[in-house]
Amino acid sequence: MIPDRHLDLDTAFTTGVDGIRFAVVSLDIDPLSFVRAASDHFEGAFYFSSPEGSAVGGVGIAAKASASGPERFSGLRSAVDAWSIPEPFRVFSGFSFSAAGPTSESWSSFGSADAVLPIATLLSGGDDRRLLLAIPPELEADSIIERLSSLDTPPDPVYPNLGDHTLESCPPVSEWTTAVAEAVAAIRDEAIRKVVLARSVIVRSETAPNGFNVVGHLERSYRQCFGFGWRVNGATFVGASPELLVRSSGGLVTSNPLAGTAPRGEGEAEDRMLADALMRSEKDRIEHRYVVDDVAARLAPLADGLDVPDKPSLKRMATVQHLSTRITGAARPGVHVLDIVDALHPTPAVGGTPRDPALAFIEKAEPFDRGWYTGGIGWFDGSGDGEFAIGLRCGLLEGPNAHIFAGAGIVADSDPDAELLETRLKFRPMLELLAAT
């Protein structure tokens, strides 16, 4: 997959402050193909792509940092700053919905907030494709180069055939719709204005799916989404998220909150009718505005000249369509993308508003561990630029078992059965791959 002549690096390495040796090689290889080929040969594998076409995939762990609690993002930033990463290297990062971190055994290999500098990373954007090597001092560069040179180009991923399977809903459907009704009552009593309630489905199959093959299928079917995969200790968090939490690039900050959802129609006429109804829906526009106003208010101390459109646009995905507002501004000097993540998470699109009572309601109502679902996943670099998607349309793969997740924003006019249907539509990207019959 990587010819030896591309890895003649005897004089190419520079050494960082912690003894990590860095090298950059021009190499025209697709990052996801690279990760699929290399993931079984290294501890840890990571991938992230954006709808605009850029992608980054890495394997191995040259350095890792973790932090938890209310100061987890500043702690993560401080730890990674000490690595003094040169351009154009990327640090993969992901975090849980809860600042306390995941609590269940299924999520035991995923921290509250993790950052990883891979040993080998493929970076792709436009015409730029490069292999980035970060060799820690305890490893021999020659052995890493030999391992990379031995990789074979993987075949195109085949559609998963996982044999017989069973599905388990957590909580049971009747309990979830009851929780939705209780949330509506709390909202009408003005205890909260909006809360997002999630469900989980466990798919138990005869055969274990390959996580990065699943990512490849998701990318092909949901090109408007951010594709991602994070494998550690045999468990892989995968998904295709429609929602950008934040992108910080060259001083420009962008966030794209989504809230308010409708299904896609069977034909063009029905699709247009459903889209028009969504755009006119007072219930959905109120839900959406809660999110937009909150995101704009939290961005204001960190970015100047915020552009916040008065009206949402429509973002169409394969199975659903969302109300969407793209917010942009100029990052203030010294603002790191993790500072913005810290300010925004959790947005009302995944938690609720007001934040604290909504989170308290979720903790009481949800009988499972969200883990990194509705957290975030992405990357950042040594200059503080980066890109994070919200962990949506996703699942945690553990051998033959998969935990998949979906949620719905509950407001005063929410109907439990309609919200249940919304979660079923959001489950479809993962279920179509893992539970096909």
Image (cartoon, helix red, strand yellow):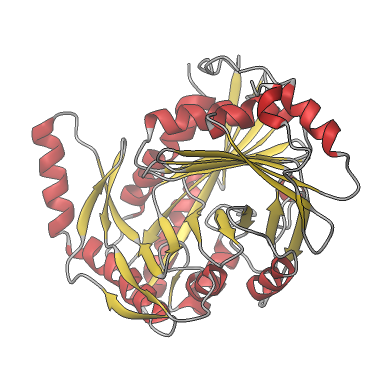
Residue 35: name its quadrant.
Answer: top right
With respect to residue 332, does 7 lie above or below?
A: above
Q: Position of residue 173 (x, y in %)?
A: 48, 44
Q: Position of residue 201 (x, y in %)?
A: 55, 39
199 on left or right of 180: right
Of residues 269 and 292, which is closer to you in this image?
Answer: 292
- Can residue 323 be seen from the camera position used here? yes
Of residues 42 and 160, which is closer to you in this image?
Answer: 42
Of residues 75 and 410, which is closer to you in this image?
Answer: 75
Residue at image point 67% right, 31% down: 401
Residue 206: name its quadrant.
Answer: top right
Which residue is the extreme one toward the front? 11
The total number of labels drawn is 0
Q: Position of residue 329 (x, y in %)?
A: 33, 73
152 on left or right of 300: right
With respect to residue 306, does 424 lie above or below?
A: above
- Can residue 394 be seen from the camera position used here? no
Which residue is the extreme one toward the bottom? 301
